[in-house]
Every structure is written in C-alpha cells, then in structure tokens.
Image (cartoon, rainbow, N blue to C red):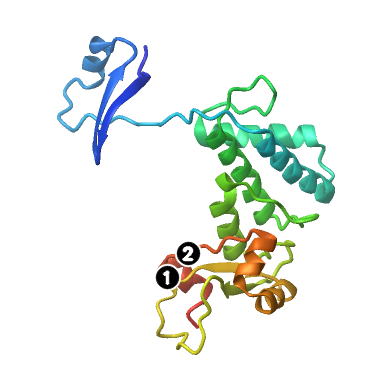
C-alpha cells in the first residue's frame, strides 16, 4: 500500500506550497490510516536535487577512504560497504559512486559527511589535507573547530582562531562571540595566517570561517 508519492512543485510562498501529485492518491488507504484520528494530517517533504554527483565528489570520497585505509588497514571495498550501510540507515536511501549511479550532489555530499564523521570521531590523520568541495565545506570546517583539528593539515589540539575578524583588544568575556567566524588552525598555520593576513591566507588554503551558536561557544570555552 503506497504511502509515498512524488509531485511537481507549482508554487512556493513562504510556508505555503502548491504541488501537482504525479500519482492518484489512495484515499481508502488514508481513511484507514486516519480512522478515529482527529489530529493534523502531517506529511514529509524531500526536495530532489536535480544535479547528478560529480567526479570531484567521487575523488574526494575516495581520498577520505584512502586515509582511513592508511591508518586502519581496513580494505577500501570493506570501508565502502560500511559507509553505504551507515548512509542507508540514516536516510533510508541507497548510495553509489559508480558511473551509472543517479545519486545527486546533495546525496553524495551527505555520504561524504558520514565518512568525515568517522574520521573526526576516530582521529584519523589527514595525509595531505583536503580540497573541500562546496557541498561539504560548512560541515567540514565546523567539525574541525568542534574537534580542534587543524583544517589544513589535520593536526590535533589546534588553536580556535577568530578567523575573518580579529578579536583585537575587545574583552573576551563580554564580547558576543556568535558574531565572529572561527577556524581551527595548528600553531604553524595559525602563525602563517597572521603573517600573510586573512585575505592572502584564505586565497592560499581556501579556508572558510564558520559561525558558532552560543551553546557551542560556551561548551568549547571560547568566551574565556
């Protein structure tokens, strides 16, 4: 009995959405589901990314798997299956990086985020650092900050730098740190950033400063 339907969006105005459903809805099934139920009828929405995943995404995923293999000795094929199962458990969807796959940029982006989680949680060293793709940037740099891992070379116990705008002489205990962006940099790269200046440093390493909410700032002790 079908409870899932596909649809084409016709209009979107803030929180009001109009769609044309591609299949005829099974009204009898819905009546059975909602029999003697007086609450709101809720549905789930998932916008389908029309972009097929890219070769760059595949290379990035294999670079991550390669570093896990180098550290753990677990074969690449075995690792692929482990992370496919994790992705499927998280989303209920299949994932493949094969040439014939129709998986999207967003789906493979989430798949590589799942692999990144494993890398950060298990302190897998980065072999050469990564060229982070746009779809993964926010999550990658956030994980670097929250695990204090240098976002360039992967060294642990990195400094948490007020990245795009320096704190200067402002009082660390009274300033609103949520207005700043942050990056995790080892001592070497932190010093290089100060030597080069933020613009030249960003151009060289493609580092993205990320904002943190007050809860994360407090948890990490950034406010002093």
Is disc 1 in contact with disc 2, using a CB cutoff of under 8 Å? Answer: yes
Residue ID for mark 2: 211
The image's mark for residue 46 is: none
Left or right: where 14 falls relative to 161: left
| Res 215 → quadrant | bottom left
Q: 44 or 28, which is in the foreground?
A: 44
* Front-most of residues 183 and 38: 183
Task: Residue 64: give x, y in percent of width and height.
Answer: 73, 45
For label 1, the residue is 178
Image coordinates for residue 123, horizontal then vertical, percent = 71, 58
Q: Is residue 65 above or below residue 120?
A: above
Query: x%, y% of residue 97?
Result: 67, 29
Based on the displayed image, in which of its 4 quarters is residue 186 positioned?
bottom right
| Direction from residue 140 to residue 218 in the image, left or right | left
Q: Secondary structure at mark 2?
A: loop
Res 61 → quadrant: top right
- Residue occupying image coordinates x 63% and y 42%: 112
Pick whichever of labels 1 and 2 is earlier in the sequence: 1
Q: Could you tell me how many numbered marks the image carries?
A: 2
């Amino acid at each position: 009995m079908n409870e899932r339907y596909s649809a084409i969006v016709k209009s979107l105005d803030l929180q009001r959405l109009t769609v044309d459903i591609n299949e005829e809805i099974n009204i009898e099934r819905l009546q059975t589901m909602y029999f003697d139920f007086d609450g709101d009828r809720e549905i789930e929405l998932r916008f389908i990314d029309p972009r097929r995943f890219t070769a760059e995404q595949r290379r990035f995923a294999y670079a991550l798997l390669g570093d896990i293999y180098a550290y753990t000795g677990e074969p690449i094929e075995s690792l692929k299956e482990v992370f496919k199962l994790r992705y499927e458990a998280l989303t209920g969807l299949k994932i493949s990086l094969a040439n014939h796959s129709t998986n999207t940029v967003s789906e493979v982006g989430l798949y590589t985020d799942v692999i990144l989680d494993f890398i950060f949680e298990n302190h897998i060293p980065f072999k050469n650092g990564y060229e982070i793709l746009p779809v993964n940037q926010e999550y990658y740099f956030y994980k670097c900050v929250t695990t204090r891992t240098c976002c360039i070379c992967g060294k642990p116990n990195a400094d948490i730098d007020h990245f795009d705008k320096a704190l200067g002489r402002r009082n660390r205990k009274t300033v609103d740190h949520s207005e700043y962006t942050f990056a995790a940099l080892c001592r070497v790269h932190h010093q290089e950033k100060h030597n080069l200046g933020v613009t030249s440093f960003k151009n060289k390493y493609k580092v993205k400063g990320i904002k943190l909410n007050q809860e994360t700032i407090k948890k990490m002790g950034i406010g002093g």
